């Protein structure tokens, strides 16, 4: 039905482009047709490329958040969790409200790295890596999705640097690609921002460690790292891989604590992850609790607004007491 509306609109050049959305409401798991998350992700991405974005609302406790996350992340939309019947209404109305306020459609963040460098996304935004050839480095394209007026999104990239000589420089460039929500039919081609260039210089370990870090940016990186760890650990917990979940948190905590040393405001995150470490490997979390933790982490990572009236708090508010 949406595709038919899009085709009719495309036949009227000069008219405003419809903001096309599908909101998937589900209280279960896909058991007919396409069921694999990777395949659902691919279809959602292809629809997004055509201007059709997908959002998903999981209802109750038995739905597959893996399948719904695949649709929402690659579809450029959002993932929501509804526990109470009234929350379904709140979420659908909230989506319609944000749709009216949308100013940027289908935004991607594109990062280019030098030869021998590798960029990894810290978090669960859908993304695609294109391997460089010859003197070209890798390109990482991250799906940010749509943005309402006044919204902002933060992404953190982890760089693994290639070899180099002291004093050599290497540049990483980042740009945004998006469509304007106010475009007319025939004018909706993607717009690219001017690339931002970050130049790195090869130096000794001593000189690197002597650099002063930016506390605000370091805290942002730690926050995204925390959210990504919570999502990965709770997924393993729900899959019944308790030992792997506990080992993952223990391993990451060793590096996380060192990174946060002397960083103002990071103490609460370290304390919350200690609480996670104490319970993640003991028993499977209740499905609703795990889903609330994952949704809270996703919204925190993406800077998305909680559309439910009854506040659920941060992810650690759902940990066992």
Image (tube, grey):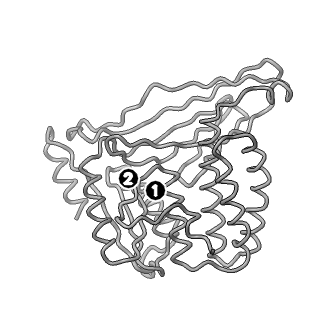
- According to the picture, the residue beneath numbered tag 2 turns out to be 48
Q: Is residue 67 left or right of residue 148?
A: right
* Residue in the image at 54% along x and 65% along y: 294
Q: Tell me: residue 36, above or below residue 22.
A: below
In the rendered structure, which disc, 1 or 2, sits on the residue that comes first in sequence?
Answer: 2
Determine whether 267 is above or below 211 in the image: below
User: Of 292 and 167, which appears nearest the observer?
Assistant: 292
Q: Mark 1 highlights which residue? A: 74
Where on the picture, by quarter, is residue 113? top right
Quarter of the image that includes the N terminus = bottom left
Name the element at disc 2: helix
Q: Are marks 1 and 2 in contact (CB under 8 Å)?
A: yes
User: Between marks 1 and 2, how big is the CA–CA gap?
Assistant: 8 Å
Give the quarter of the image for residue 130.
top right
User: Percent from the top left, x then y, of residue 15?
Assistant: 14, 41
On the picture, is 262 further left or further right than 286? right
Mark 1 crowd level (few <14, some 14–19, many ≥20, 10 Å Cα):
many
Relative to 276, is 98 on the left or the right?
left
State the residue lying farthest toward the top.
167
Q: How many numbered markers are drawn? A: 2
Q: Height in image: 154 above or below 271? A: above
Residue 248: x percent and y percent?
74, 63
Task: Identify the residue at image location x=54%, y=59%.
Answer: 297
Q: Nearer the viewer, residue 151 or 62?
A: 151
């Amino acid at each position: 039905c949406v595709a038919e509306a899009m085709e009719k609109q495309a036949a009227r050049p000069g008219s405003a482009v419809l903001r096309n959305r599908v909101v998937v409401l589900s209280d279960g798991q896909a058991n007919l047709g396409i069921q694999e998350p990777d395949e659902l992700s691919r279809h959602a991405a292809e629809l997004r490329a055509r201007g059709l974005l997908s959002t998903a609302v999981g209802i109750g406790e038995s739905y597959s958040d893996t399948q719904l996350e695949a649709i929402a992340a690659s579809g450029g939309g959002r993932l929501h969790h509804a526990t109470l019947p009234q929350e379904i209404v709140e979420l659908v109305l909230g989506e319609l409200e944000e749709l009216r306020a949308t100013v940027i459609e289908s935004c991607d963040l594109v990062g280019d790295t030098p030869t021998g460098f590798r960029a990894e996304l810290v978090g669960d935004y859908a993304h695609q890596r294109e391997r460089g050839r010859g003197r070209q480095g890798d390109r990482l394209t991250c799906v940010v999705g749509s943005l309402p007026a006044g919204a902002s999104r933060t992404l953190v990239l982890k760089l693994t640097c290639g070899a180099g000589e002291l004093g050599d420089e290497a540049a990483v460039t980042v740009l945004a690609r998006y469509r304007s929500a106010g475009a007319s039919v025939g004018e909706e081609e993607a717009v690219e921002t001017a690339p931002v260039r970050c130049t790195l210089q090869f130096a000794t370990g001593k000189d690197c460690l002597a650099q002063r870090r930016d506390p605000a940016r370091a805290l942002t990186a730690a926050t995204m790292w925390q959210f990504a760890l919570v999502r990965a650990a709770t997924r393993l917990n729900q899959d019944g891989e308790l030992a792997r979940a506990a080992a993952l948190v223990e391993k990451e905590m060793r590096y996380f604590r060192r990174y946060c040393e002397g960083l103002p405001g990071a103490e609460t995150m370290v304390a919350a992850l200690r609480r996670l470490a104490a319970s993640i490997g003991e028993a499977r979390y209740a499905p609703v609790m795990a889903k609330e933790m994952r949704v809270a982490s996703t919204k925190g990572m993406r800077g998305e607004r909680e559309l439910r009236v009854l506040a659920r708090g941060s992810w650690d508010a759902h940990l066992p007491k």
